[in-house]
Amino acid sequence: MSTPAAIAVVPMRARHVPEVLAIEARVYPRPWSERLFAAELARAGRAYVVARAGDRVVGYAGLLMIADDGHVATVAVDPDWQGQGLARHLLLAVVRRAIELGARQLTLEVRVSNEVAQALYRSFGFAPAGARKAYYADNGEDALVMWCHDVATAEYAERLAQLEASSPLAVDHHRFEPAPVRAAGAHPAAPSREAS
């Protein structure tokens, strides 16, 4: 486990993708491709961030908007940096961005065996809402579908502030540029772990 230095969560840019791919290969059995990341970064209604320790990318997260739903597409932390609270800050960044983009609720899929991630998501207010059978192609594992409702409220903003304040890490959260206007009812295609 590495000792955190100065940690910053910043919007993901094309220059970060090679380091993101290295983490992707270490944490996922079916990593996304460089092409998929490039396509995601170019699409409207997406929010991808990286956590940087100095000049090194040590984690990333991504979210896409489908109407007024924010879908958490990916969260990953370099195994050398896991267990220090970085995933919380990555999720804080994409959740806040989703709310800026008009999200009223959030959703995600998580492996049924990944209890650590499920605990993180529950701390954000996500609750199980169903399952996707044999969702993960590498081993046929089911995905737990989780939803978090009423995120565009003062109460939820307070929850996020408490999550940030209770973190043992001091993290600098950089802001995104102003949200682009998107077509009402637009439903962009959602990538999945099987989309590599």
Image (cartoon, rainbow, N blue to C red):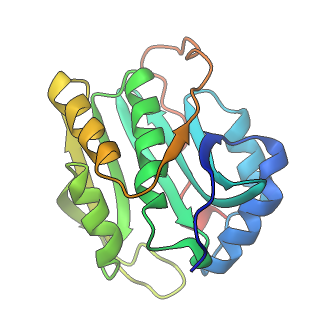
Q: Position of residue 31 (x, y in %)?
A: 66, 71
Q: Tell me if 46 is positioned left or right of 96 in this view.
A: right
Taking the image as drawn, is residue 42 in sight?
yes
Q: Position of residue 143 (x, y in %)?
A: 34, 71
Residue at image location 81% in from the left, 43% down from the top: 14
Q: How many marks?
A: 0
For the C terminus, the quadrant is bottom right
**Residue located at (69% from left, 42% from top):** 12
Q: 168 and 118: which one is in front?
A: 168
Please indicate whether residue 174 sits to the left or right of residue 56 in the image.
left
* Relative depth, front residue between 87 and 169: 169
Q: Is residue 54 above or below residue 130?
A: above
Q: Quadrant of residue 95?
A: top left
The picture places residue 43, in percent across and down from the top left corner, at 67, 32
Query: x, y percentage for residue 97?
Result: 46, 30
Name above or below for residue 183 compared with residue 9. above
Q: Is residue 144 visible?
A: no
The N terminus - image quarter: bottom right
Task: Give the vertical position of 140 relative to 58 (above or below).
Answer: below
Q: Viewed as shown, does residue 153 lie left or right of 28?
A: left
Horizontal side of 178 relative to 150 (left or right) equals: right
Between 68 and 135, the one lying in front of the other is 68
Residue at 70% x, 39% y is 41
The residue drawn where x is 60% and y is 81% is 29
Farthest residue, direction bottom = 139
